[in-house]
Amino acid sequence: MTKNILIPTDFSKNAWNALKYAQQLFKQTKCNFYLLHVSDFINYPVSPVFIEGDEEVETEKLIIPSKKQLNELLQKIESKFSNTKHHYFGIHQHGFFLETIKKNITEKKIELIVMGTKGATGLRKRIIGSNTGDVLTKVKCNTLIIPKGVRFSDAKEVAFPTDYNIFYSHKILVAMSEILNLGGGNIRVMNVSKKDKHLTEVQEKNQEYLFDYLSETFPKNNSFHTITNKSVNAAIQCFVESRDIDLIIMVAKNLNFLQQILFDSLVEKVSFHTTVPFFVIHE
């Protein structure tokens, strides 16, 4: 079976880094990599010729620079990568970013999106850029986010932060297992608890189900941890740093928890969000 992977690109170093990470992660897997560049005309300068001339012809002229960049990217890939299991395809389309992503997921039967992110930037240092954040929350496709400058390493230590508020469906568990099998890593399930607060009956059942699955599937490669802390973010960051975590797995279905970790926080310094890749699973 060939895996279809979509990699949105703006021709930046971050997008190239995401591609490199993906081709190393799936080095033993047959893959079709679809490199998608979405153009709109908002950022293009409008020339007098464009206003006076035939709109369709001149619109096509405005797209040429990014089409050329896409062709150059494919040539660069051909010269740098030599894995015969991998095939690369360039897609250049005009339209809205999210809608174009969704359309290609359906048409190309995409199983995974891999995206680079610039990390925390700007005055308020928000953790996730708008495009990446939109893909994570509005596109129902498993997504691997590669922060700026992260070099590939096998995911030997994988963190799975959870509040046990959702049931772990077969689809979630299969996606989790696939990513763990690629690196032969250990999964560390962690729950952040406030002092004197206990799990509800539903949370306990979900925890038990997850424990049973991991004990059967990865008997020697799993552990469960409860950390008492007022801040979920601080607890996860401490856990990630102390255990040298290589990858964080999260479930999109648990949107409140996901947003609490990734979107609502303002960071004062570089945190785990900008140094560790994270894999978000959709059902």
Image (cartoon, rainbow, N blue to C red):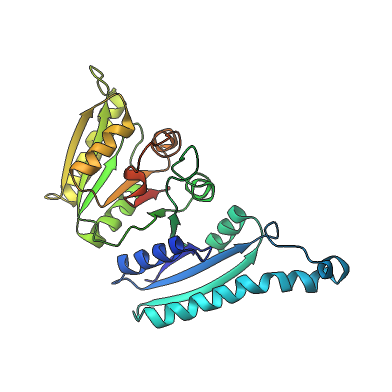
Residue 181 percent coordinates (x, y): 24, 59
Q: Is residue 109 left or right of residue 157?
A: right
Q: Is residue 42 above or below residue 91?
A: above
* Residue 150 figure quarter: bottom left
The answer to whether residue 203 is left or right of residue 93 is left
Q: Nearer the viewer, residue 9 or 112?
A: 9
Which residue shows up at 29% across the image and 28% down it?
203
Q: Residue furthest right?
A: 52
Residue 232 against residue 214 in the figure, above or below: above
Residue 189: x and y, percent? 23, 40
Q: Residue furthest top?
A: 196
Query: How far across and how far down the image is residue 173, in percent?
Result: 31, 48
Percent of width and height locating residue 159: 25, 45
Name the side, left or right, on which 239 lies relative to 133.
left
Question: Which residue is the extreme one toward the left?
Answer: 220
Quadrant of the drawing holding the N terminus: bottom left
| Picture quadrant of residue 165 | top left
Task: Inspect this view and state whether residue 52 appears.
Answer: yes
Seen at 41% across and 66% down, the residue is 19
Q: Is residue 164 visible?
A: no
Total residue callouts: 0
Query: Who's the residue at 43% across and 57% down the image?
Result: 116
**In this orientation, which residue lies closer to the viewer: 58 or 101?**
58
